[in-house]
Amino acid sequence: MMRSKSHGASLVALTTLLLGLPAAAHADLKICNRMSYVVEAAIGIDDKGATATRGWFRIDPAACRVVAQGSLNVDRLLLHARALPVYGASPIPQSGTDNLCIAPDNFIIAAARDCRGKQSAAPFTEVKPSTGEDGHTTAYLAEGSEYDDEQARLAAIQRLLVIAGYDAAPIDGVDGPKTQGALASFLKAHNLTPDIVQAPNFFQIMIDAVQAPSGPGVTWCNDTRYRVMASIGTEDGKAVTTRGWYRIEPGKCLHPDIIGQPKHVFSFAEAVDNDGRTIKVDGKPLNWGGGTTLCTRENQFETNQQRDCDARGFNATGYATVDIGTDSGKTLRFGMP
């Protein structure tokens, strides 16, 4: 297909902007994260009929990051964000109406409405950045709780503590003895001093601890070349609650959240492709479960009702029973058959 000179010039201009090359003006665009998740963001720039995208920009809670340099005199600015795999299926709602191309790893895509190769389409939302006192234009990532920076950071710490197996619920960004006790236990278990909480890389330290194949509870480790989606079931003496999905990338481990101290839990996991479809090997689904039938759903879910799965819009799925009665916990490794 032949492009007009103006269209080609627009693509060059957009790509130059996304590359962050020096520009005449210095009103840079930055994204600030007021969510309780560590996120990776991608931006889209739509101008004069051409659209380009760039990602990924990792942004910790209560932090900001410059994602484009120079004056943004463009028709539309678009944004897509995803939570890190440690949180399971991305909890960030995607309501954008512009489906633009992204890639699994860091990328710059000049023609972002025509996906090729390993690129896939993702929903982008148009944003209207504001100009701050520093002269930069700023777009904010926020969730329904409308946290300020301090609340977002604390809620993010609470969330990772819960995933790591410490009782810091509810995740509300409000400090108190329960959160401080859970944080102190986490620091002690990982031989960390209290001052590390203020370190710039504290969220990465927490994420590394969650993904480490050790500690009480259960740890999943993905030894395949595929992405694995996993679900956990816990019993409180009255009912079994299943929740999912947790995303585990190839070669990574993940320690799912388990409230309380149950002697056993239930585990199910399956390998999926980039479109979320179950991987099959020799015609059989590549999954890891067992003989205990519990309820799951294709999208993110949590339920404590385990009867009549099909009638309630769930799937009846076979979970493995995992004994975690010892202090050392249990590591489940997902490998090829």
Image (cartoon, rainbow, N blue to C red):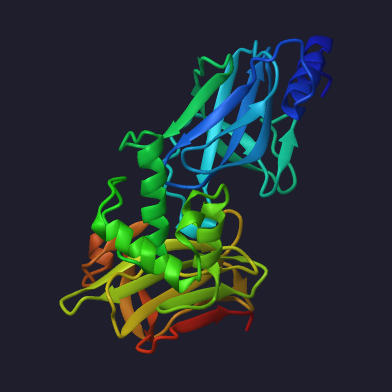
Residue displayed at 56% across by 26% down: 78
Q: Where is residue 9 in the image (x, y as percent from the top left)?
A: 81, 14
Instruction: Residue at the far left: name it.
Output: 238
Q: Is residue 233 above or below residue 62?
A: below
Camera-nearest residue between 294 and 139: 139
165 left or right, relative to 65: left
Picture quadrant of residue 134: top right
Q: Is 52 above or below relative to 170?
A: above
Name the spot of residue 98 as percent of width and height, x first: 54, 28
Where is the C terminus found, in terms of image quarters? bottom right
Could you tell whether 269 is left or right of 243 in the image? right
Judge by depth and name the residue closer to the eye, 277 or 34: 34
Left or right relative to 236: residue 328: right
Tally the numbered discs. 0
Q: Is residue 244 left or right of residue 201?
A: left
State which quarter of the image contains the N terminus. top right
Q: Is residue 210 above or below residue 325?
A: above
Q: Determine the residue positioned at 33% across, 33% down.
A: 146
**Is residue 256 among the parts visible in the rendering?**
no
Provide residue 22's location: percent of width, then percent of height: 79, 20
Q: Residue at x 74, y 35 (%)?
A: 108
Residue 60 x/y as whole percent: 52, 44
Residue 213 lies, with reference to residue 170, above or below; the image says below
Q: In which quarter of the image is residue 5?
A: top right
The one nearer the camera, 124 or 127, is: 127
Residue 156 at least partly seen: yes
